[in-house]
Amino acid sequence: MSIKSFSAKLFARYIRNKIDSWASHPIETQERVFKDLIKFAKNTRFGQDHNFQNITSHEEFIKNVPVRDYEELRFYVDKMVAGEKDILWPGKPLYYAKTSGTTSGAKYIPLTRESMPTHINAARNAILCYIAETGKAAFVDGKMIFLQGSPELEDKNGVKQGRLSGIVAHYVPAYLQKNRMPTLETNCIEDWETKVDAIVEETKAEDMTVISGIPSWVQMYFERLYEKTGKHIGDLFPNFNLFIYGGVNYEPYRAKFENLIGRKVDSIELYPASEGFFAFQDKQDVKGMLLQLDSGMFYEFIKADEFFEENPARLGIGAVEIGINYVMIISTTAGLWGYNIGDTVLFTSLAPYRIIVSGRIKHFISAFGEHVIAKEVEFAMQEATEKTSARISEFTVAPQITPDGEELPYHEWFVEFEQEPENMNEFIDILDRSMQEQNSYYFDLIEGRILQKLKVTTIPQNGFQQYMKSIGKLGGQNKLPRLSNDRKIADDLEKIKKN
């Protein structure tokens, strides 16, 4: 055992004990975080505008601070970006994590001296919890790759800005620098396909032990490695035994990954975002990720079914229940207040508090009142691939409201197969049955002949990559929406299929 791996085991036990301490006192931990947030920000422009000096409870916070998304908070963010200080949080931010996706252009999410360490520590702690649980630490002596955005940053009125993953790349601890792949030069390549090819050349002869990234883009890396070497990933990297991922559900990709690797490997799920590092998988044998209650973030939860009502209840951590779909609202040391990040979560445990990401509040299908969410379609796809010979590369779902002729409307599943099922009708039957079992609204619509059984449209190999490239979102932190309530993505995919 190397000195590095031995030290990692000792440090892992220390961190695990610290985590267990706050996780066993969740209510007290969140109350402390809440009071600290209000105290530190009471003299900011936002704090003065929202009566922070008189807020002493969650109830008073709700009365003074409405739930907002980025566009509704933009008045304050624009002042910060223009160079003003003490707006949402004392002083100026350290960075802006620049993201796309809003109707009015780029979003600039502040990262502060207080919030930045929580991103770094959570990623580190996820790995340390794995070491503490399994005793496996030899991987720290091998090479590790983190597929991420370019670390090159721009200046915005005296504050650096860039992709979150690129910003985080500047904080890789010194003891991992020699293990880290790819090189800085390769990491700065903007074109994703060129970057992946360069990473393949740099890593194909290395002793890779840890590989991390969004599953869809790691899959592309694995495919390029296989094309280049003709070897399964597990044979090319015999000491590769840990895959770290976040951003999307891994389960629909698992069968294809295991085929590409040639064997099973351990995995750790993360829940990072520009707005905060919210949760990570701290146990290999339990479902869900440990919610980070001690990382400068105060959480509120609104039932997704009530979210669009006039005054939905905003629940603290002590009032949530297992199995209910919640919209997660955050207030943070980055100066985000009552902020709707757009994600929905389900609690899988309350002691400690663990969650899974169930989807996006704006990404759903309810063209007929069915309220279908990402968790349901992902679980159905997992069932269908497990029970048939199918392996998929990617998929998305959209409603077909106005089909040709006299037929009933339906949900259309666009699927790129690595290996099609031997019996496509059986595959479709499993998908549809799973959806009906999970979603009573969908069941009623099928039974009432409002909808017909779902249909599968196959997309040619690399079709989803073509689509993401066509909209300028190939690689990095970009993710394909699992479902949508209109035909915008579907229409573009149909064009790719025809070509």
Image: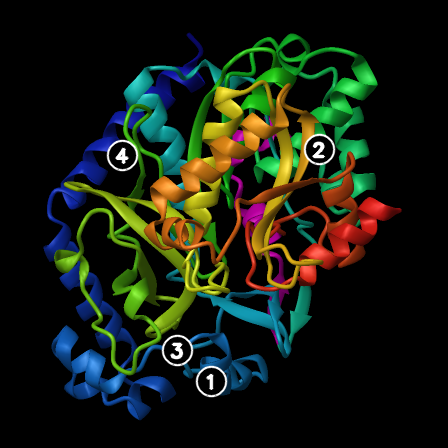
Q: Is residue 137 magenta?
A: no
Look at the numbered disc 1 and give the secondary structure of its residue: helix
Label 4 – label 3 distance at C-alpha = 34 Å
Label 2 – label 1 distance at C-alpha = 39 Å
Label 2 – label 3 distance at C-alpha = 36 Å
User: Which amino acid type is shown beneath numbered disc 1?
Assistant: Tyr
The residue that mark 2 highlights is 220
Label 3 – label 1 distance at C-alpha = 12 Å
Circle 2/circle 3 CB separation < 8 Å = no
Left or right: 128 with respect to 274? left
x and y percentages locating residue 102 in the rendered image: 59, 72
The residue that mark 1 highlights is 76
Left or right: 55 with respect to 356? left
Tell which circle, 4 or 3, labels the residue nearer the N-terminal end.
Answer: 4
Q: Is residue 177 magenta?
A: yes
Q: Nearer the viewer, mark 3 or mark 1?
A: 3
- Residues in magenta? 158-181
User: Which amino acid type is shown beneath numbered disc 3?
Assistant: Arg
Count of numbered badges drawn on the protein: 4
The residue at the far front in this view is 406
Look at the numbered disc 2 and give the secondary structure of its residue: helix
User: Which amino acid type is shown beneath numbered disc 2?
Assistant: Met
Tell which circle, 2 or 1, labels the residue nearer the N-terminal end.
Answer: 1
Tell which circle, 2 or 4, labels the residue nearer the N-terminal end.
Answer: 4
Graded by Cα atoms within 10 Å as few (under 14), some (14 to 19) or many (20 or more), the crowding at tag 3 reads some
Relative to 101, is 76 above or below? below
